[in-house]
Amino acid sequence: MPNIAGKNQYGDKLYPPDNELRAEFDQYTRESLPAPDQLARLEAKFGLKIKRSVLYQLRKWLSNSTVRKNELDELDMSQAVINVKENDIMGLWGVGQIHWDGHEKLGGQALGMGPIGLPIYGGKDEWSSYLIKLVVMPSVRLACAIAHVKLDVIEEMDYRIAITDVTDMGTETGEMLHIQETLRMDAAPEFSLEKWPSGMRLRSVHNTPIESFWWWKRNGEGHSIRHVLSLGCDRGIFHPNDGIHIDVFNWLWPPLVQDRLDRFRDYWNSHHIPYQKGKLNASGTSPRNALLLPTNHLQEAYGGDEGYEAAFRFVSWEFQAEADNTWLALRRPSIILATAWDVFTAVVDHISTEQATNM
């Protein structure tokens, strides 16, 4: 049993609560982390510096499974860390180049279901392969909307700024790159933009870290979502010329798709990247581990709260409340891919009846 009180000849240690440690160890198991990386993560997250023997005692005490042995050569890992830190101008290991792109295979034109669509915008760190952001939006072609994605990510990343943002040639990335340049220059003015560009625009075919990811996504979860969406039209459930149908679609489907994206993002960031000797980018670990171990005035410039709402909100607050109340009246039916169109039909029928009664 470990010394949970944390008192020994080396001074007091403050251990996090058991439930937090258990959740943390569960995450390490999912990422197949070796003991040295687990110790580093504990220190980075909780400020807890312990020996390997204490780690094993903690895991045994909390009844967590151990991870499989990692074949990563410790010498190669040490050299990789040195190389990355030498090339990271702000000491933010793992936040080097973030590649951004929109994915419109679930957009309006691709779906062909009338004035609705579920386009996705994503960002991926090149070195760690960490999926920084994956969000469904009303539109991925509006500069102010993409600016809000960038501001969200800055906040979510604890205000760490990437060295370079890489995008395609689309006009929607202009404000994002402007924000990136402004904050990069503020964070590290001593590094010239000529030598260390804050942003780069590439043709989509050359923006390979994120473009290749879309191919992987399209042949996995994205395919099953699109198939279920198409059933709505194929079976005559969804009518694109009906206003209530459009509002209920935009109330029901974006949160469901976002939940699937969040689950996929968590899976991706926890999956083990096979070790490849000589590979410049991270390998032999998870994207999450590779990333972890290495502003309000701007939001106002892009419309403040109203601009944020316009960037991410699919339906009005009024319709949101109406649909939520309908869902409650229907005794909270589960909304998953298998039941989504059944719930859609029930909500449409209920709202249509209510509106007809009140006319």
Image (cartoon, rainbow, N blue to C red):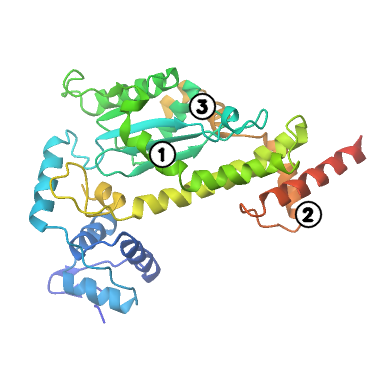
User: What's the residue at 34%, 76% (across, down)?
Assistant: 62
Which residue position is annotated with label 1?
Answer: 215
Q: Evaluate whether residue 48 shows in this view.
A: no
User: What's the residue at 48%, 23% (across, down)?
Assistant: 144
Q: Which amino acid is tagged 2?
A: Ala
Tell which of 138 and 148 is nearer to you.
138
Determine the secondary structure under disc 3. Answer: helix
Determine the secondary structure under disc 1. Answer: helix
Q: Distance between the residues labelled 3 and 1?
A: 34 Å
Dot label at residue 77: none
Crowding around mark 2 (Cα neighbors within 10 Å: few <14, some 14 to 19, many 20+) is: few
Which quadrant is home to the C terminus?
top right
Looking at the image, is mark 3 or mark 1 earlier in the sequence?
1
Q: How far apart are marks 1 and 2 (CA)?
A: 41 Å
Which residue position is annotated with label 2?
Answer: 329
Q: How far apart are marks 2 and 3 (CA)?
A: 34 Å
Q: Which amino acid is tagged 1?
A: Trp
Q: Where is residue 40 in the image (x, y as percent from the top left)?
A: 21, 58
Tell which of 132 and 154 is nearer to you.
132
Crowding around mark 3 (Cα neighbors within 10 Å: few <14, some 14 to 19, many 20+) is: some
Q: Which amino acid is tagged 3?
A: Gly
Which residue position is annotated with label 3?
Answer: 304
Instruction: State which mark lies toward you, 2 or 3.
Output: 2
Tell which of 125 and 73 is nearer to you.
73
Looking at the image, is mark 1 or mark 2 earlier in the sequence?
1
Q: Position of residue 197 (x, y in %)?
A: 23, 22
Instruction: State which mark lies toward you, 3 or 1.
Output: 1
Looking at the image, is mark 2 or mark 3 earlier in the sequence?
3
